Image (tube, rainbow, N blue to C red):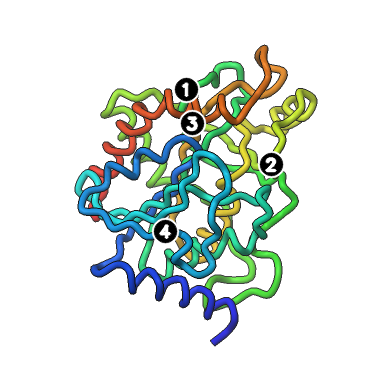
Amino acid sequence: MAKGADEIERGAGAIRNAYIGTFPKTALILGSGLGAFADKLENATDISHAQIPGFPVPTVAGHAGRLRIGKVAGTALACLKGRFHAYEGHSPAAIALPIRVLKALGVERLILTNAAGGLRRDLTAGSLMIVDDHINFSGQNPLIGTNDEAVGPRFFDMTHAYDPDLRDRLKKAADSSGVAVTQGVYIYCLGPNFETPAEVRMLAGLGADAVGMSTVPECLAAVHCGLKVAALSVITNLAAGLAGGMLTHAETLAQAGNAYQQVERLLMAFFAGLTD
């Protein structure tokens, strides 16, 4: 067994040992300040990331580091409460491994959430944005290195990185639940610093609508191994230079918390509309 395949199987095996039952076809990764949604899962089983080989333990406030498996709105769901980021020192390959483990367990679709800064003046704190495309501005990619064809192809198409059907389902869920959403392009920067005003002007000029420090590595790993992906950004602030005041992670968590009820309503309607 190849080293990569062995790592995937060890992680999947640990989860199979801790969870009895059919693993969900849908997975959700919760971004900064959105961890409370995991508490909506019924009849849930909790597995600490520390129990799963290859799963890094998050070090950032607002990311608990726990896999919760249960049901929400009638849909079986595997929920990662907390994610890990390249700026914590994790390699891109380490960020990809949990996605591949989920795939090995039978996951078919991955829903990503994140906190992001608005690059348009109308994307103020509390706005929700369905990601319809992304720009990888990090200079990193979790797929660099030897490719395992058993996981995914060396070269693969990203035309529909964010699945059109899942995006449409998110929009319909927003409409049915009375939650205002916009759609746009998310640009990924490494962090951990927030961007400078000059960088913000440049990123907006590149065609991005929101900026953050996550999501893209997971999307790349997921599309590579055949998962359908959707993503939702919670805008926690206008990016530097677009509004007064200093940017802080505490503000990010606070504003994500303020928007949480809207996110919960949208996600509950979305998961209620899935067939499994």
Dot 2 amino acid type:
Cys
Q: CA distance from mark 2 to mark 4?
A: 28 Å
Q: Residue at x 27, y 42 (%)?
A: 40
Q: Locate residue 157, reporting x and y percent.
A: 58, 59
Provide the secondary structure element on which disc 4 rests: strand
Dot 3 amino acid type:
Val
Nearer the observer: mark 1 or 4; the answer is 4
Q: Locate residue 132, reporting x and y percent.
A: 51, 40
Residue that carries the numbered disc 4 in the rendered image: 48
Nearer the observer: mark 4 or 3; the answer is 4
Q: Earlier in the sequence, mark 2 or mark 4?
A: 4
Q: Residue at x 63, y 70 (%)?
A: 154
Query: Mark 1 near mark 3, Cβ–Cβ under 8 Å?
Result: yes
Residue that carries the numbered disc 2 in the rendered image: 189
Quadrant placement of the N terminus: bottom right
Q: Earlier in the sequence, mark 3 or mark 2?
A: 2
Pick whichever, 164 or 220, lies toward us.
220
Residue 234 badge? 3
Residue 126 badge? 1
Q: CA distance from mark 1 to mark 4?
A: 30 Å
Residue 153, placed above or below residue 272: below
Q: CA distance from mark 2 to mark 1?
A: 21 Å
- Few, some or many C-alpha atoms within 10 Å of disc 1 (few <14, some 14-19, many ≥20)? many
Quarter where residue 269 is shown = top left
Q: Earlier in the sequence, mark 4 or mark 3?
A: 4
Q: Locate residue 268, reporting x and y percent.
A: 28, 38
